[in-house]
Image: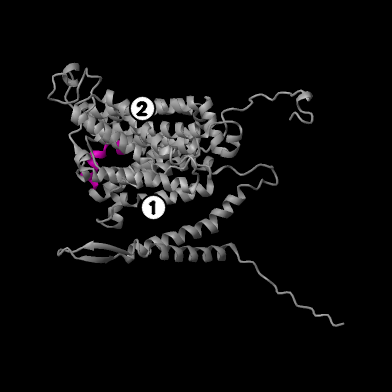
Amino acid sequence: MAVTVSPERDTVAATPMQRALREAFYAGAIALGLFVLFIGLKTDQNISNELILVQRWGLLAAVVIATAVGRFLYVAYGQPFLANQKIADVATGLLPASVASRFFLFPAFIVAVIVAALLFVFSRSLTGWVGAEPAGYLQFLRALAVIYALACVIYYFRGFIHANFTKLGIAALVLYPIIVVGMLSLMSWSLVGGLQGSLKWVDNFGIQILIYVMLAWGLNIVVGLAGLLDLGYVAFYAVGAYAYALLGTQYGLSFWILLPAAGAMAAFWGVLLGFPVLRLRGDYLAIVTLAFGEIIRLVIINWREVTNGSAGISGIPKVTFFGLMSFNVSDPNYIGKVLNIATSSAYYKIFLYYLILGLALLTAFVTIRLRRMPVGRAWEALREDEIACRSLGINTTTTKLTAFATGAMFGGFAGSFFAARQGFVSPESFVFLESAIILAIVVLGGMGSLVGIAVAALVMIGGTEVLRELDFLKQVFGPDFTPELYRMLLFGMAMVIVMLWKPRGFVGSREPTAFLKVRRAVSSSFTKEGHG
């Protein structure tokens, strides 16, 4: 019998550097294929209003090279470094010092504070001293110094912050306008200048973020607690906004009367949406809710006799302080005249900030209270397993309807506030993209986690607003570069990163509200056959 022996081939494993070069090449090739039409070519209009293609091969090459270099550095140095962090020293038996302890050094913290303070003090003189272009880079350096200093403070006091995160967060939100006005007043050496300068920071970085926090907390009741995927949540936002706009302009009713009315109307439409989808779940539920959101938007556009169509509704009355003080300078009870203070448009923005903060905290309080009640536990049971929920005797019909109605009510509250803040509403503010952004905030923050959703809204919406301030990027990528247009790219990158490293979100938590906090012994009479 003949025996055939096949010689073994010597296989040599690729070195880390070879693997890094190979993966860098693959990453660059994938980036080239993905962005060649998005970045390499751009549609524009010439002087004759003809559509032309603008070639941006240099920007495309920069993106591809940056992607390849980033992948190379991660595979060649990042992965081995992270692997070595898990290997204990043979002599001492200790793990290496953490990256954070080596990055957040106290001398570097002092330097960052000094740099930030100096650049804040001389911010108005930088352009005259060094020119416009270097001044933009110095402003970016100031922002990095502030971020590093804040990160150091969070790292040094991480134990205290983790134990008192909610209290510290609420305190920071309450003091935010005061801190902003104080810092800007010190920079301009004028209280009036500080008030005027605070308009952008209170409005864009305060009110805007809190609106999305409230919307995401309202959607969290439907998606995070009840487990019902809703892609048309912006419809309730639109119902609340148009309810306040129409009733306020046509009948002159007060905001404080129309706020609960808008919430009740949105809750009513939430119940109307809930009835057709009682037997649906998963993808089918998502499609129906998406269609509902589009139906509401199309009705607003086409019902011109009532909603004024695409032109929108303008002249929406402002909010007053319960009728006691007004924010219109021409009114006799204007806040400046009543309190005998200087006239400023910042008073109204600060008042709106505290108003939306109160509404957001009300949303959080109601959500927490409902979670501990039987209806909240029914939502969680429905989220985990609808069949088991039904077998326990829970009425899934009322459970779904209460989830839709409650979430829609808070969406209506946010919509009425949005209309009062803008003074103008139109269908363009309630497109599907808004629903996608709100749902992305809920998923990124962690479904069911109020703190995580607030952090996600701060990062995503605040990060979008920060992009508008990065004017120095135009000096790098050209004067036509608009950083805020890349916010959806950042949304996608953030979702991919979070899904890879934190699948449950920033602060994901699915812990039920009903559980035994103390281990207890159970009598054997309850655990014998037929009893447990």
Q: Which residues are magenta?
A: 119-130
Q: From the top left corner, tell me how far across and down residue 355 is, in percent.
A: 31, 26
Residue 62 lies, with reference to residue 228, above or below; the image says below
Mark 1 to mark 2: distance in Å?
Answer: 31 Å
Q: From the top left corner, tell me how far across and down residue 246 is, in percent.
A: 23, 33
N-term-proximal mark, 1 vs 2: 2
Classified by dominant secondary structure, the portion drawn in magenta counts as: helix
How crowded is the residue under tag 1: few (<14 C-alpha within 10 Å), some, or many (20+)?
few
Point out which mark residue 154 bears.
none
Q: Which residue is mark 1?
A: 489
Q: Amino acid at mark 1?
A: Leu
Question: Quick check: 182 left or right of 367?
Answer: left
Disc 1 is placed on an element classified as helix
Report if the CB atoms under discs 1 and 2 are less than 8 Å apart.
Answer: no
Residue 483 lies, with reference to residue 196, above or below; the image says below
Residue 516 lies, with reference to residue 474, above or below; the image says above
Q: From the top left corner, tell me how far across and down residue 275 is, in percent.
A: 43, 38
Q: Is residue 153 visible?
A: no
How crowded is the residue under tag 2: few (<14 C-alpha within 10 Å), some, or many (20+)?
some
Quadrant, the C terminus: top right
Is 471 within the magenta?
no
Question: Quick check: 362 left or right of 5?
Answer: left
Is 121 within the magenta?
yes
Q: From the top left corner, tell me how far across and down residue 415 is, in percent.
A: 31, 34
Q: Amino acid at mark 2?
A: Leu
Q: Quadrant of residue 258?
A: top left
Q: Which residue is mark 2?
A: 359
Q: Residue furthest right?
A: 1
- Residue at screen point 60% across, 47% down: 85
- Residue at screen point 50% across, 57% down: 73
